[in-house]
């Protein structure tokens, strides 16, 4: 029997093809682990799935990329490395962000102040789905949405977390690691008139005050850092008015209930009907002044750890916050 192909008789000496396989196997197992990783991450269209299936430990990410082909290296160099490590942690059976389970439990019981006043509920708000299920509703980025929403005669509308939105199907929401667009909404939207005040739900420190000017981006954006029972986490407020820099600056200490921003109008909020995008992040990854507002549908188990349900702090009724 052949040592390389034990199920095949070689009549004494292994066939040349089997000799080649045996030599390759011997060489592969004699190399350092980092040099053997080239077979783990092939140059496939969906590198995220390849990572999930690789079995590589998160701390080996740099070695894995370095051992991969030049094409794979070039593609992954364009991706947030924090996302890649989170994928490997989840694939290994752990939390995508260490400690996030404890953080979620803390968020669900923390004493919080309302982000807008009064809070939306079923008496003054309606869930506004952007998944195409309501053909009468214009897209949030369509100026016709304002008149449509005004006709509802309600103070608020909400856009749910976990919704797969058609407005995120453009190349702007793609990346080099996968053909899959980031289309699943990670925050919760609250629609109300421009200049509606925004209040801090918890004490914290201003991490960044920025203006993200790309079309369909956040426009004026605020990120606060908080202490979640010994675990740091962050809240993001997007689509704000240009009053933001006059209210807060990086490094400022913020009290719970303090006014921190206003809803922005079309010209300053990224090109959307006036609303607040509110989001929680357990890890800022490698982002600064901005953060992913939508995630990949196939990676939602990972994104759920990176961006816990913002409803844990908003305390909206279930029917106004989930897809």
Image (tube, rainbow, N blue to C red):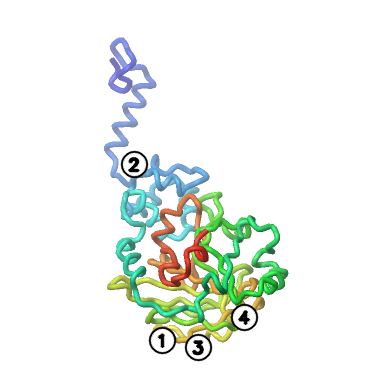
Disc tally is 4
In this view, the mark in front (4 or 3): 4
Query: Mark 1 touching mark 3, by CB under 8 A?
Result: no
Q: Residue at x 45, y 49 (%)?
A: 48
Q: Nearer the viewer, residue 155 or 34?
A: 155
Where residue 194 is drawn, which disc sits there? 4
**How many neighbours does mark 4 have within 10 angstroms: few (below 14), some (14-19), or many (20 or more)?**
some
Where residue 207 is drawn, which disc sits there? none
Q: Quadrant of the N terminus?
A: top left
The residue positioned farthest toward the front in the image shown? 123
How far from the left and from the top, in percent, is residue 12? 28, 11
Q: Which residue is mark 1?
A: 252
The Cα atoms of the two marked residues, 4 and 3, are separated by 16 Å
Q: Secondary structure at mark 3?
A: helix
The Cα atoms of the two marked residues, 1 and 4, are separated by 24 Å
Q: Nearer the viewer, residue 202 or 61?
A: 202
Tell me which label, 1 or 4, sits earlier in the chain: 4
In this view, the mark in front (3 or 2): 3
Q: Which residue is mark 3?
A: 247
Q: Which residue is mark 2?
A: 36
Q: Secondary structure at mark 2?
A: helix
Q: Is residue 294 visible?
A: yes
**How many neighbours does mark 3 have within 10 angstroms: few (below 14), some (14-19), or many (20 or more)?**
few
Tell me which label, 4 or 3, sits earlier in the chain: 4
The Cα atoms of the two marked residues, 2 and 1, are separated by 49 Å
The residue positioned farthest toward the bottom in the image shown? 246
The Cα atoms of the two marked residues, 2 and 4, are separated by 56 Å
Query: Mark 4 touching mark 3, by CB under 8 A?
Result: no
Tell me which label, 3 or 2, sits earlier in the chain: 2
In this view, the mark in front (2 or 4): 4
Q: Residue at x 34, y 45 (%)?
A: 55
């Amino acid at each position: 029997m052949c040592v390389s192909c034990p199920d095949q008789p070689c009549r004494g000496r292994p066939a040349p093809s089997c000799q080649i396989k045996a030599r390759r196997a011997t060489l592969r197992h004699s190399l350092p682990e980092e040099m053997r990783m080239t077979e783990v991450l092939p140059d496939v269209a969906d590198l995220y799935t390849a990572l999930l299936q690789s079995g590589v430990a998160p701390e080996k990410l740099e070695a894995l990329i370095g051992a991969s082909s030049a094409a794979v290296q070039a593609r992954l160099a364009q991706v947030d490395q924090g996302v890649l490590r989170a994928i490997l942690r989840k694939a290994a059976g752990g939390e995508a962000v260490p400690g996030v389970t404890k953080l979620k439990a803390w968020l669900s019981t923390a004493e919080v102040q309302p982000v807008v006043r009064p809070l939306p509920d079923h008496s003054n708000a309606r869930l506004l789905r952007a998944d195409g299920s309501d053909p009468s509703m214009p897209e949030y980025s369509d100026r016709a949405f304002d008149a449509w929403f005004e006709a509802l005669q309600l103070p608020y509308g909400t856009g749910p977390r976990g919704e797969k939105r058609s407005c995120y199907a453009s190349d702007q929401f793609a990346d080099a690691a996968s053909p899959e667009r980031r289309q699943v909404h990670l925050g919760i939207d609250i629609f109300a008139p421009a200049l509606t005040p925004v209040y801090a739900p918890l004490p914290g420190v201003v991490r960044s005050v920025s203006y993200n000017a790309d079309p369909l981006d956040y426009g004026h954006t605020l990120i606060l850092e908080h202490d979640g029972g010994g675990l740091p986490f962050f809240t993001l407020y997007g689509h704000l008015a240009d009053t933001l820099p006059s209210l807060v600056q990086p490094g400022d200490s913020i009290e719970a209930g303090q006014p921190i921003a206003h809803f922005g109008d079309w010209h300053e909020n990224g090109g959307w009907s006036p609303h607040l995008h509110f989001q929680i992040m357990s890890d800022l990854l490698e982002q600064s002044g901005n953060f992913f507002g939508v995630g990949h549908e196939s990676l939602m188990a990972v994104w759920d750890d990176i961006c816990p349900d913002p409803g844990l702090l908003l305390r909206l009724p279930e029917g106004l916050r989930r897809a």
